[in-house]
Image (cartoon, rainbow, N blue to C red):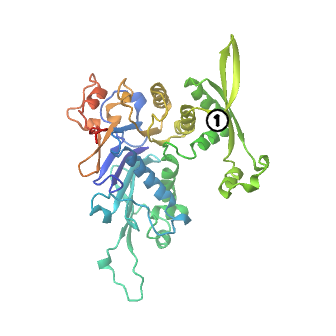
Amino acid sequence: MLIRFEVENFLSFKGRQQLSMIADKDTEMEQTHCIEPTGVNLKLLKSAAIFGANASGKSNLLQALFFMRNFIIESTSGEKMRKKTGHEPFKLDRKTQDEPGFFEAAFILKKKKYIYGFKIDREKVIEEWLYFYPGKKKVLLFERKIVEEKNLELSASEEKKPRYTHKFGNNFKGEKKKIESLTRRDSLYLTVGAQFAHPILERVFSWFLGFLRPGIAQGTRGLTVFTLNFIEESDNQKKKVVSLLKSADLGINDVKVEKLKKEQFTDFDKFPDEVKKEVEEGKIFDIEMIHSAISDNNEVTANIDFMNESKGTVRIFELAGPLLDIIEQGGVLIVDELEDSLHFDLQKKLLAEFFKNSTEAQIIFTSHNVQLLEDRLLRRDEIWFTEKKEDGSTELFSLTDFKPKPRKDKSIKNGYLNGAYGALPVLGNILSE
């Protein structure tokens, strides 16, 4: 479970901003919207919904989460041998362009609270740290810090490259020096240690890999494949996807899926290598949606190719696999623009099913649909806003940051649209010369 995420000096984030999943003392919708994980004295929220104007930084917050996850997973991969981190600092201030970015996540793993984070610039890792709470106090596992160049004593023949100091807690055992020697300046100690099956680092790495899921954005590649693989795993999982499609009132009664083999293509040898690889790895499917309708008092069925389905049908199919998977397995699902191609009632349905059936899952999503602020769909501490400040940076804040807190009998949607919480666009005369 994610407890909080912090980011600084990345994309539109200049100063440090925090997204917290800790619930306040309010008991509103507590049974369906909150989780109290075993082993830690915390009440966590199942969702965080982020609203704000275009270009205010909503998607950048999700990108920051994606970036942290992907850098952890890929910092030692062959594709990163270019000796760059991929970090993009805040660019509207000359000072921040040369300063490191900050990324930190607090989360629950094996009934204990962990804190992991790092600072990086475009070229290298500056700092990296991992703590945990075996009891009430925070305990160091490891800390890695760059040695400032002015403190380095280099001979004329030595290469001028960054060096690091390492500190280890008493609970951190294993081949510390070996991992240290194999960690490049643009790689993370965590990632290298996980590759060498260090028990603690492997568990933390696996949390970012498996529990913090890849994000869902408009046009995200691979989501259809994810749902198809989810269907292929068992008949029960296929039934759940079909049940979700039926409940969405799309006129779909079943899904027919066939994994295509290279022998089925007469011109397979002419395919690009990338497509050949996907076919051989079983990532190319033929999908048909089986629709039914009543005609002259008789039920009529028809198979419709997935490519001919509406954007809304494709979107709900893409969401079905990841959503059902985290409900079953637990995890943090990140969705950019939840409303993309979906009717409001369908958005309500998806969220209601998630809150009702999830026990160890969380969803973090952005939206422009202010109707989600009504009808008691969300607790007040699940509602967040992003606002662009005068210097072009993003400020992230919760509805519960306002004092006094908005009353439950007041319309949050109307308050937002009337400017009570900020995070609205300031529009000029769009068609003026």
Q: Quadrant of the N terminus?
A: top left
Kindly tell me whether residue 37 is visible in this rendering: no
Please identify the quarter of the rendering in which residue 120 is found: bottom left
Residue 399 position (above or below residue 178): above
The residue closer to the viewer here, 343 or 81, is 343
Please provide percent x and percent y for residue 365.
42, 39
Outermost bottom residue = 156
- The residue located at (40%, 51%) in the rendering is 64
Tally the marks. Answer: 1
Outermost left residue = 404
Outermost top residue = 297
Residue 245 position (above or below residue 226): above
Please provide percent x and percent y for residue 309.
61, 32
Kindly tell me whether residue 30 is visible in this rendering: yes
- Indicate left or right for 373 with 270 as reference: left
Please provide percent x and percent y for residue 423.
28, 39
- Indicate left or right for 11 with 212 as reference: left
The residue closer to the viewer here, 218 or 122, is 218
> In terms of secondary structure, where does tag 1 sit?
helix
- Indicate left or right for 208 with 412 as reference: right
Please identify the quarter of the rendering in which residue 77 is found: bottom right
Residue 166 position (above or below residue 338): below
Disc 1 residue crowd, few under 14, some 14–19, many 20+, Cα 10 Å: some
- Indicate left or right for 431 with 288 as reference: left
Q: Amino acid at mark 1?
A: Phe
The residue closer to the viewer here, 299 or 372, is 299
Residue that label 1 marks: 306
Please provide percent x and percent y for residue 281.
69, 51
Residue 413 position (above or below residue 138): above
Please identify the quarter of the rendering in which residue 429 is found: top left
Q: Quadrant of the C terminus?
A: top left
